[in-house]
Image (cartoon, helix red, strand yellow):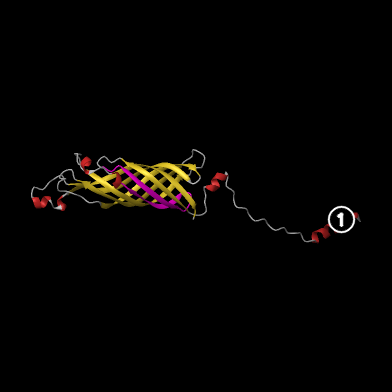
Amino acid sequence: MQPLRRLASLALALSIPAVVRPARAEEPPKCEPRAECAKQPARPWLSLRPYWAHSFVADEVSHDELGASLDVYASRRFALGGDFAVDAPFNPDGDARAQKARLLSETQWFGAVHVSYVLLPGRLRTWEPDVYLVGGVGAIATRPLSVVDPAIRTYGFKPKAALVAGLGVRFHVAPGVLAGVEARDTLYHELLENRVVQPAEPLRKDPDTWFGATELVNRVEIQLGVTFLFPPL
């Protein structure tokens, strides 16, 4: 009888429906360490970078410029933006540049749209910087300076198409603030002054005779800037 009672108890227990507990909602994956979470915003944000730059073109009198770059980040690594810089306030006066013996040029302003990609994201309160690449297209307004016939020839600034490529490093110095340096190369074609002076007066004053060869210029410069990150849009 005892085995029969045990079988009956087991059958009764199996006939009672089990209480089904609701399944727990899956928790979002956690970032480890927490600093990684701060580097992965879900929405775009803005960055503004004022900078000072110095170029290293031997046959150009424009070396210093002030500019600013504005970027919209779609992710921690990818951004689309533009920048604009002015050189004219820092160009030397006419007397100083006319004493040069070689052909010279002068820059008035520069503007471009660019794409940035962060190769190595850095962290706040560490010595790990952001390392990024930048590339784009734009325009640069330049002109030849007359050293062959300055009494007659005067040139106006004309914009020229330019290609831009650069590599930068920036350190997180405070929340939303980064300081860094960028090496940039601007590639464009420059019109040089004609070394030949026409003997006849009408031709000598003809602007079509003032221009000579076209030269491909690599305008390498170093930029020092501070980047300000704004809240997500």
Within-10-Å neighbours for mark 1: few <14, some 14–19, many 20+: few
Which residue is outermost to the top? 127
Q: Nearer the viewer, residue 131 or 199?
A: 199
Task: Using the image, determine if residue 141 lies above or below residue 126.
Answer: below
Please state the extent of the stretch shown in magenta in the rendering: 61-87
Q: Nearer the viewer, residue 133 or 144?
A: 144
Which residue is outermost to the left? 200
5 horizontally vs 105: left or right: right
What residue is shown with label 1?
A: 6
85 horizontally vs 233: left or right: left
Quadrant holding the N terminus:
bottom right
- Going 28% across and 49% down the picture, which residue do you hit? 108
Query: Given the image, on which type of amino acid does mark 1 rest?
Result: Arg
Where is residue 110 drawn, in percent x and y? 32, 50
Where is residue 221 drawn, in percent x and y? 33, 42
- Going 9% across and 52% down the picture, which residue do you hit? 202
Q: Nearer the viewer, residue 98 or 110?
A: 98
Please say whether residue 117 is one of the residues in the magenta stretch: no
Where is residue 178 drawn, in percent x and y? 46, 44
Task: Using the image, determine if residue 185 lies above or below residue 202.
Answer: above
Q: Main secondary structure of the magenta part?
A: strand
- Using the rendered view, name the quadrant where residue 32 is placed: top right
Determine the secondary structure under disc 1. helix
Please say whether residue 68 is one of the residues in the magenta stretch: yes
- Using the rendered view, name the quadrant where residue 103 is placed: top left
